[in-house]
Image: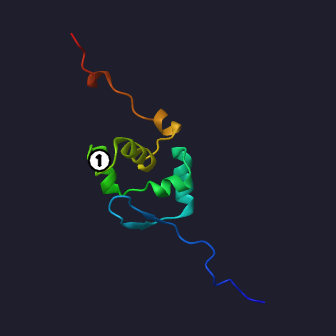
Amino acid sequence: MTNNTNTKQNKTPVLTCLVTKTNRTTNLDYLQNKASKAGATVEEIVSNYVSREVLKNLRRGNLQGLSQEQADRIIRLNGKQKSKASAARAPKARTSDVAIAA
């Protein structure tokens, strides 16, 4: 009988940036949580991963060779997902912060 306890059953997921090709290790729980919040699959999150710096550039309008549709999808899947609870706790604008048109 062979003992396979030393064999690694689950590989650690590695994310590869679509633009820079840099790698980042992650874990399956993180990917599943992110996919759930984004309404996507783990495979979609992995296949559309970009680094934080690339994401910042995409938000600034620098498409980095991507179409606008691709950029929008990548921003949606890589950006922070706001839960309904945190949106409800968001501070409201104060009347002193709102300009009144004459």
Is the residue 66 above or below the residue 24 in the image? above
Name the quarter where the C terminus is drawn.
top left
For the residue carrying disc 1, how many other residues have a C-alpha within 10 Å: few (<14), some (14-19), or many (20+)? Answer: some
Q: Amino acid at mark 1?
A: Leu
Q: Residue placed at 44% from the left, 54% from the top?
A: 48
Q: Secondary structure at mark 1?
A: loop
**8 or 102: which is nearer to us?**
8
The single residue placed furthest to the right in the displayed view is 1
Between residues 14 and 83, which one lies in front from this camera angle?
14
Residue 65 shown left or right of residue 89 in the figure: left
- In the rendered image, the residue lying farthest to the bottom is 1
Q: Position of residue 23 (x, y in %)?
A: 40, 67
Q: Give the residue at x 24% y 20%.
A: 99
Which residue is the extreme one toward the top?
A: 102
Q: Position of residue 35 (x, y in %)?
A: 54, 50
Q: Residue at x 31, y 47 (%)?
A: 58
Tell me the residue that label 1 is attached to.
Answer: 63
9, above or below 55, in the image = below
Query: In which quadrant of the rendered view does residue 10 lie?
Result: bottom right
Q: Which residue does the image show at 53% across and 46% down from the upper left?
A: 37
In this orientation, which residue lies closer to the viewer: 26 or 16? 16
Q: Position of residue 15 (x, y in %)?
A: 45, 63
Where residue 29 sits, quadrant-wise, is bottom right
